[in-house]
Amino acid sequence: MARIPYGDPAAPDAHALVERIVAERGSLLHLYQMLIHSPPVAEGWLAFLTAIRHRGVLPGALRETVIIRIALLNNAPYEADQHVPIALREGVTQAQVDALASWQDSALFSPRERAVLAYVDAMTRQVQVPPEVFAAVRGVFNDRELVELTATIGAYNMVSRFLEALEIHTHDAR
């Protein structure tokens, strides 16, 4: 159970935003139900994550692979629960999803995906990225792609930290 109650979607200052979230996301997920405690934060969050997930040029399968790896590294099961179905729709195989916990030992990932996963691990675990890890991703991405990849990793580390600090989980009742 979450550490604080979920926000009230019927609250006057949240109503219009809740309608927008449902229109864009299909439902009011636990994450957004918590965020609506602060409509300005929820609105900024929605805009930022919509840009990351729907307006960038990164392939969906790669983006979702990144998000799931972050969820695994940060022990954020709600984040993984939300993104595994999306990853599968985007073309990630179940075998790849299953191998993400120990991707270094798997032959299921291309050299480009391996460079990305090493970048995810460095940014998530140690923040500072070793020169050789950066050189590997720099070698396979243009400037826009590299900025979007880096922003995606940063954004979903933010998501998992928010989820875990407030103990937001899939099985929570609303």
Image: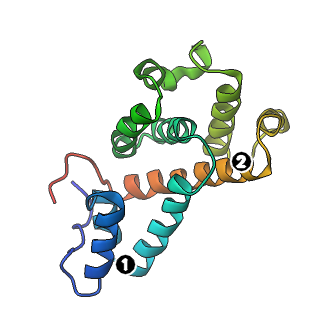
Q: Residue 133: image x %, image y %?
A: 78, 34
Give the mark toward the camera: 2 or 1: 2
Amino acid at circle 1: Ser
Q: Indicate the secondary structure of the residue bearing disc 2.
A: helix
For the N terminus, the image quarter is: bottom left
Mark 1 or mark 2, which is nearer the start of the sequence? 1
Q: Residue 167: image x %, image y %?
A: 32, 54
Q: Residue 96: image x %, image y %?
A: 48, 22
Mark 2 closeness class: few <14, some 14–19, many ≥20 residues within 10 Å: some
State the mark number for residue 38: 1
- Depth order, front residue of 35/140: 140
Query: Residue beneath label 2, please?
Result: 145
In the image, residue 34 above or below residue 124: below
Q: Residue at x 46, y 41 (%)?
A: 71
Q: Outermost residue, bottom direction? A: 12
In the image, residue 119 above or below residue 14: above
Q: Is residue 36 visible?
A: no
Q: Residue at x 43, y 80 (%)?
A: 40
